[in-house]
Image (tube, helix red, strand yellow):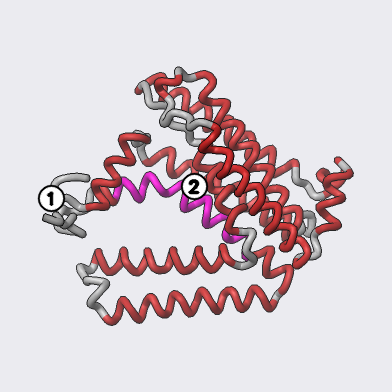
Amino acid sequence: MGEPNESLTAADSRAWFKRFPDQGKVPIVLNMIAALFGNAIIFLLVLDGYLRAAHLIVLVAAETLLLLIMSRAQLLLVPQRDWPEQPKPWSERWPILAFGVFWICGAYSITLLFINGWGDLLELIRSREAWIAAWLHIPLACTLLIALVQALADYRHYRLHGGPFVSSILPDALGRLLTLILGGIPFAMPFFAVTFGGFKAVEYVARKARIEPALAAVVSVAMLVVAYVAFALVELLIRHGVAGWLIGFLLAKLAAEMAIAAIPLAMSEAAKEPAQARVVQDPS
């Protein structure tokens, strides 16, 4: 796990970079810009009334499926020895896949009742015109275009630096999947986003100020304030009903995609932490 005087976070970060080599900060920034651009288009469609709650669920599901297929297709042009990780047997994968499908179908069946979205969903199933009327093809086309640009950049990086092959599309797919899974619990995603993001921000400021979070009362108060804000946000969204759910889901989608895109940056910063921070304790 590392030397006795090594930071646990730094050791884990370096292990992560062995599996997913650092491509620099430019791809990270570009991925964040792409996430902001794509979600800005969706936000405008929501404001104009084209996209309703059920449409947004279908859009995220379609984007997830599209990006997962594209990330898998990328590997077909790369020798298997250069894959970031070798595929697991179906005996290990199908239970997770089955549970995911069961959770998404069950959770969103209830969510669609809450947001009065079954009518819109059935209309999308029955009619291609419903997709066009909701302008779903616009954000899907943007997602496809961005993914194609990322795929070309991934292959260029692979040709220049060799294996293992690193996909920029897969993190985007995981961001959508995270939104889809946690979004099945109404208002859970906004709560988690504010709470987790707020706690991490407090910890970051405390660490930069050389304050020990476990001992500083001001840090504890700040975390209580973050929790209060998270609960207040959820209460506000609930009071606004379907519109509140839609806003919360959209903001949570953006937060999930930005968080996934920022993982390499967070790992890079953690790898630079001084050895004195969170020292690994030797049980002997």
Residue 261 place in picture, x, y as percent: 46, 46
Residue 79 place in picture, x, y as percent: 45, 17
Give how far apart the Cα atoms at labels 1 and 2 are: 36 Å
Q: Amino acid at mark 2?
A: Met
Q: Amino acid at mark 1?
A: Pro
Residues 82 and 217: in front is: 82
Please tell me whether mark 1 sits on a helix, a strand or a loop.
Answer: loop
Please tell me whether mark 2 sits on a helix, a strand or a loop.
Answer: helix
In this figure, which residue is indicated by the disc labeled 2? 32
- Checking the image for residue 4, the label placed there is 1
Residue beneath the point at 79% across and 55% down: 50
Q: Is residue 158 left or right of residue 94?
A: left
Residue beneath the point at 58% across and 66% down: 188
Q: Is residue 5 left or right of residue 182?
A: left
Residue beneath the point at 72% across and 73% down: 241
For the N terminus, the image quarter is top left
Task: Examine the structure image and report whether residue 15 is included in the region drawn in magenta.
Answer: no
Query: What secondary structure predominates along the stretch shown in magenta?
Result: helix
